[in-house]
């Protein structure tokens, strides 16, 4: 019997509860008024997602805050899972502090099993040969062995898709990762910090790809490969190396058609983006805007069970959409330096170099505008029809 459901990925941007602090951060906690605005926003976004549904969420700090938000929406009866989000009370100060950010799952389908994955699979042994071309040279081990934000793995009971597994992820951001000895204002430190973040994200992508392959190699009760959906903020665009790592290599054509063996081998654990399979009708193709650039970093990846692949497809994507109306920024038509405000002088005046009075190696002042009452991410969703 045919039926359909919705899948979505929703970065909640630092969702926490009233009066709860963020471990290791100087962010202002929510008060009653700001949390009310945040909860109303989250509920409104959820009301736009048609049930039944599977929603992967990111940046959960207090699971009770997520429950309070969902309770205000049309998804009030959905299951809410965020097992790694925990709040502790300082016995001295009495302050409640949350660790994170963490991922979670909101779903109207029965949950058969759930676990979190922090450590990389043993097979992910990351070593880099530092030689030119085929010269192996020195082999350097990269001792990154765990996800900064654990991956959530859940098996759901969805009719027509026995063994359906969902992975919710939030890979390392592009925000530079500084050493304690470095000044965050230093251009060199920013460069090295960005490199470290890229390295961590790449290692996490390789480890997540290994988990994807293991899920696909496992068999469900019907003897077929487990259908798989990956939902999350992967912090890199759809065409980036790390995102392509998650997807796997695609079949390529020889003389206009793909070799049957190559086609079967490469599609066994191939994952493709729902928004590539069925682009949004309104043409919106970004979920985040940074420095004027719109990128699609919030992801819905689907296994061969949802793809037009010979003998394997059991479901299809009928509609996709990215909700971006709440975003404060929009992509610029071109990326360039902004114009400098004119001084209004009638005649050119020789000015002192403004950098002369700036101590660029000193600590960068932090700014807090209060807790977020919306989200800085768009929300991609896709409607799945099961045959």
Image (tube, grey):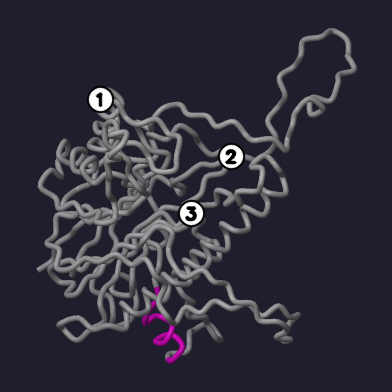
Task: Find residue 180 and name its label.
Answer: none
Alpha carbon distance from label 1 to label 2:
32 Å
Q: Quadrant of the N terminus?
A: bottom left
Question: Is 250 a magenta residue?
Answer: no
Q: Quadrant of residue 67?
A: top left
Alpha carbon distance from label 2 to label 3:
15 Å
Which residue is under mark 2?
A: 291
Alpha carbon distance from label 3 to label 1:
31 Å
Label 1: element kind:
helix
Q: Residue at the spot x=53%, y=66% of the render? A: 202
The residue furthest top is 346
Label 2: element kind:
loop
Q: Which residues are magenta?
A: 261-270
Label 3: element kind:
loop
Mark 3 / mark 1, whichever is N-terminal = 1
Task: Find residue 32 and name its label.
Answer: 1
Q: Residue at the spot x=24%, y=61% of the render? A: 384
Circle 3 Cα neighbour tier, 10 Å, few/some/many (<14 / 14–19 / ≥20): many
Q: Quadrant of residue 165?
A: bottom left
Pick the residue in front: 253 or 184: 184
Circle 2 Cα neighbour tier, 10 Å, few/some/many (<14 / 14–19 / ≥20): few
Q: Nearer the viewer, mark 3 or mark 1?
A: 1
- Whether residue 320 is visible here, answered yes or no, is no
Which residue is under mark 3?
A: 235
Q: Quadrant of the C terminus?
A: bottom left
13 lies above or below 226: above
Magenta: predominant secondary structure element?
Answer: helix
Q: Quadrant of residue 139?
A: bottom right
């Amino acid at each position: 019997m045919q039926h359909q459901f919705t899948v979505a990925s929703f970065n909640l941007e630092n969702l926490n509860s009233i009066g709860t602090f963020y471990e290791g951060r100087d962010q202002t906690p929510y008060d009653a008024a700001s949390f009310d605005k945040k909860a109303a926003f989250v509920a409104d976004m959820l009301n736009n997602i048609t049930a039944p549904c599977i929603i992967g969420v990111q940046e959960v700090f207090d699971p009770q805050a997520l429950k309070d938000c969902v309770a205000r929406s049309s998804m009030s009866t959905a299951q809410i899972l965020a097992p790694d989000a925990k709040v502790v009370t300082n016995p001295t100060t009495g302050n409640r502090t949350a660790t994170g950010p963490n991922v979670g799952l909101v779903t109207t389908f029965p949950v058969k099993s759930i676990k979190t994955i922090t450590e990389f699979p043993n097979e992910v042994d990351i070593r880099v040969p530092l030689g030119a071309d085929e010269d192996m040279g020195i082999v350097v081990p990269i001792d990154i062995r765990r996800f900064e934000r654990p991956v959530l793995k859940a098996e759901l009971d969805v009719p027509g898709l026995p063994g359906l597994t969902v992975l919710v992820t939030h890979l390392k951001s592009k925000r530079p990762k500084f050493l304690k000895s470095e000044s965050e204002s230093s251009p060199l430190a920013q460069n090295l910090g960005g490199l470290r973040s890229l390295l961590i994200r790449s290692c996490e992508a390789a480890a997540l790809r290994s988990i994807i392959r293991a899920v696909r190699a496992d068999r469900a009760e019907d003897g077929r490969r487990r259908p798989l959906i990956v939902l999350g903020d992967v912090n890199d665009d759809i065409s980036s190396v790390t995102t392509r790592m998650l997807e796997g290599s695609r079949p390529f054509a020889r003389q206009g058609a793909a070799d049957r063996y190559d086609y079967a081998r490469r599609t066994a654990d191939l994952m493709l983006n729902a928004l590539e399979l069925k682009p949004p009708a309104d043409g919106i193709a970004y979920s985040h805007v940074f420095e004027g650039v719109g990128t699609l970093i919030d992801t819905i990846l689907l296994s061969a069970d949802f793809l037009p692949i010979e003998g394997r497809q059991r479901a299809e994507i009928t509609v996709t959409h990215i909700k971006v109306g709440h975003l404060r920024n929009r992509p610029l038509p071109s990326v360039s330096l902004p114009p400098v405000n004119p001084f209004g002088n009638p005649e050119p005046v020789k000015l002192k170099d403004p950098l002369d009075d700036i101590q660029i190696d000193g600590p960068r002042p932090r700014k807090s505008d209060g807790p977020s009452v919306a989200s800085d991410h768009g929300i991609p969703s896709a409607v799945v029809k099961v045959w």
